[in-house]
């Protein structure tokens, strides 16, 4: 004799089928995500990004120690704030979403290489600013002048008034171009421009007080280094 399936078994079979389909979808998504996130493209982009960030901040910190002494350099000289971590986190999130949804978008290597060149240029400009200024370069804006503070107008300061800001602007924007993040590229440009335009205005208020007409004449002859900031 053959037993017919009871009506109560049908919902159970449907449930098992849905579970099986769900597990298969999860497996496919997991496999695709693993392949994309650990592909040669993703590994190259993200490793370049990580190396650029680590090198930038560690070299910045050790240069500060070299010129100002270990006990005069707080960990804040690493220039890592909550806002900075949030910004870089958003850039990684954008990258992962885009490489999953539009993987071909991350294959434009000539654009990525342009970004890599910008990262290196920004790094060089920033470090030249620090090395040229020496002890006169600080991460905090001076509101009081001390004996060691001098107006630096030689070296890279002959062609860029604020090479430290210029270098960071190019470096940070270059990272977003390097990993082919269109949204964060635009966002970084806008946010950094707003930040540095306000910071330059604030800093130069004190520089004019410290150095008077000497700085005013210098500022008229040498561009700031940040786009659209006089």
Image (cartoon, grey):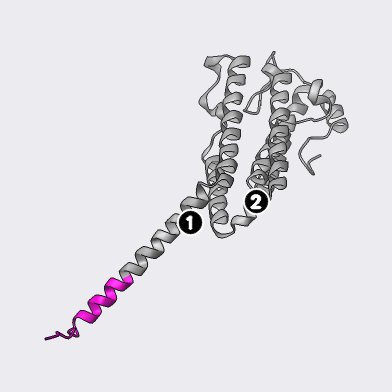
Residue under label 1: 32
**Front one among 94 and 155:** 94
Q: Relative to residue 172, is residue 186 depicted above or below? A: below
Residue 157 image offset from top left, x and y in percent: 79, 25
Q: Position of residue 53 (x, y in %)?
A: 58, 34
- Which segment is the magenta one? 1-18
Observer-nearest of 160 and 9: 9
What is the x, y in percent for residue 133? 72, 20
Along the horizontal axis of the image, is 33 left or right of 11?
right
Q: Mark 1 or 2 closer to N-term? A: 1
Mark 1 element type: helix
Residue 2 — which label? none
**Residue that lies at the very extreme toward the left in this rendered image:** 1
Query: Image height check: is 132 above or below 100?
Result: above
> Residue 202, located in which quarter of the rendered image?
top right
Q: Is residue 138 visible?
A: yes
Q: Which residue is mark 2?
A: 107
Residue 212 visible? The answer is no
Q: Secondary structure at mark 2?
A: helix
Quadrant of residue 138 within the rendered picture = top right
Asked if residue 80 lies in the magenta stretch, the reply is no
- Residue placed at 61% from the left, 30% from the top? 56
Q: Quote the CA–CA distance across marks 1 and 2.
A: 17 Å
Say if 207 sits above or below 188 in the image. above
Give the vertical position of 134 relative to 80 (above or below): above
Relative to 214, 71 lies left or right: left
């Amino acid at each position: 004799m053959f037993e017919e399936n009871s009506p109560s078994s049908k919902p159970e079979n449907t449930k098992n089928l849905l579970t099986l389909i769900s597990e298969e979808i999860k497996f496919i998504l997991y496999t695709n995500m693993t392949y994309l996130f650990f592909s040669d493209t993703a590994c190259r982009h993200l490793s370049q990004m990580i190396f650029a960030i680590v090198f930038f901040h560690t070299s910045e910190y050790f240069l500060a120690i070299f010129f100002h002494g270990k006990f005069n350099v707080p960990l804040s000289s690493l220039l890592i704030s909550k806002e900075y971590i949030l910004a870089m986190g958003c850039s990684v999130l954008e990258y992962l979403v885009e490489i999953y949804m539009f993987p071909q978008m991350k294959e434009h290597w000539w654009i990525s290489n342009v970004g890599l060149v910008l990262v290196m240029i920004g790094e060089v400009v920033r470090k030249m600013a620090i090395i040229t200024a020496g002890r006169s370069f600080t991460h905090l804006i001076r509101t009081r002048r001390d004996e060691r503070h001098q107006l630096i107008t030689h070296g890279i300061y002959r062609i860029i008034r604020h090479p430290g800001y210029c270098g960071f602007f190019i470096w940070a924007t270059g990272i977003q171009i390097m990993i082919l993040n269109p949204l964060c590229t635009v966002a970084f440009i806008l946010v950094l421009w707003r930040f540095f335009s306000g910071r330059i205005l604030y800093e130069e208020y004190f520089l004019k007080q410290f150095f008077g007409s000497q700085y005013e004449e210098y500022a008229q002859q040498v561009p700031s280094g940040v786009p659209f900031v006089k």
